[in-house]
Amino acid sequence: MRSRLFCLFVSLVTAVSHLGGREPGQIRVELQYPTKVTEMVLVGSEGDDLVFRPPGQDVGGRAYLSITDLKRQRAVVNALYPSSYGEALRDLGGGRPEVALPTLESIADPLVGYLTLGSVAGNIVPAVDAWMEALIDTGRFEEAVALANRIPLATVPVSLFTRIINLEIRLEEEDLDGLAGQLRTAILEERGWPESHLEEVLRLAAWQRMYRRWAEAAALYRLVEVEGQRLSLKASLWAEYCFLEAGEDLPNLTFLTEIPALVSSDSFFPLAQLVRSRTQEKSGLFSEAMRSAAEGITFASVDEESFPPLLLAVARLYLESGDWVAADSAFRQTLFLFPDSPWGDRASTSLEQLKANHEEDPQSNP
């Protein structure tokens, strides 16, 4: 089998272009087809070809195998890991990431450049994922971000991309804005996203929005709007909502006519009504804003993303109209439903302000 395969080998090449931003190392692999397995050394790539050589001493022979053909033949490239890799994984799973990290780094670092292989990458992704996990668990965030910036985010499995999204959220929570910004920039510059990955981008955007990081959230929503197809309308509406919250100028009322004519049974109807209500409110159309918010909350389930801001919008509009009792009730409902969240925190703050105002003016109606 080996002799037949290596009849494809040609003369020594003097230069090899590599996948990724850094030169991947030569790694021992098994090229696995549905009906055969061949041990080889993966050297690099040229265009659509992976470049291999025979095991053992490098005497210059090279084989060029088309990545497209490998995908068509359902072939995968599996790295041949040393026994220390399994030991490192056990240390990582056993809560000893600092012990596992050196081994995982030495094994996974040469593999990062091959992540663009997608389905052909075989067992390469889990090793890089384990390295990333160990970096995060040991608090080596700068190295984790540097690794993430080498990863083709739209190509790797969504499980690894989810870890990177969680990393950015953690960086934000720990006020490491510079590192978080590097990750966010890498996401915004990527194109060709699969839908599963865009769902994760929406999750990150929702987190930014929940903490009133309007510009950051809007940029992520715009990315999904352009790339998302099925998710485009949802992303567009949330992006507009973020612009409304961030802007001090009066909104452009023509946007209301651009919102699709959704009916109450449409999944995005509550969100559309939230955007409509906020636009009307900021334009001084308070009665219309209350009507839109009430329609939205009527058809929104409690677990929908639009429900908390709709409930707070209703409370705020009650307050604007002077109905402090109704506003108090809506704020208390928000606090009850979302006690450990920014929504609950805002409702609690508003309730304290209402109480203070009532103590100053006993004739008021709370």
Image (tube, rainbow, N blue to C red):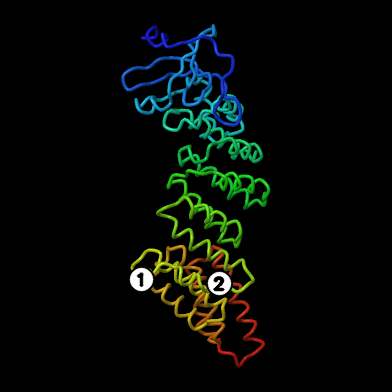
Say which residue appears at 50% left-offset and 62% top-offset: 238
Q: Is residue 179 left or right of residue 80?
A: right
Residue 252 is marked as: 2
Q: Is residue 108 above or below residue 312?
A: above
Query: Mark 2 or mark 1, which is nearer the start of the sequence?
Result: 2
**Left-right relation of 174 to 156:** right
- Three-letter amino acid code at the position of disc 2: Asn
User: Residue 320 at what x, y percent from top left?
Assistant: 56, 83
Tell me the residue that label 1 is attached to: 264
Left/right of residue 157 with respect to residue 216 in the rendered view? left
Image location of residue 151, percent across then percent down? 55, 36
Instruction: State the residue in front, 79 or 255.
Output: 255
Residue sitting at x 41%, y 19%? 31
Q: Position of residue 321 (x, y in %)?
A: 54, 86
- Note whether 117 is above or below 289 in the view shown: above
**Which amino acid, by three-letter code, is at mark 1?**
Ser
The C terminus: image quadrant:
bottom right
Verify CB contact (< 8 Å) between mark 1 and mark 2.
no
Circle 1 packing at 10 Å, graded few (<14), some (14-19), many (20+), is some
**Circle 2 crowding by C-alpha within 10 Å: few under 14, some 14–19, many from 20:** few
Residue farthest to the left, as pictured: 35
Pinpoint residue 232: horizontal percent, then vertical percent.
45, 56
User: In terms of secondary structure, where does tag 2 sit?
Assistant: loop
**For residue 356, side relative to residue 303 (left or right):** right
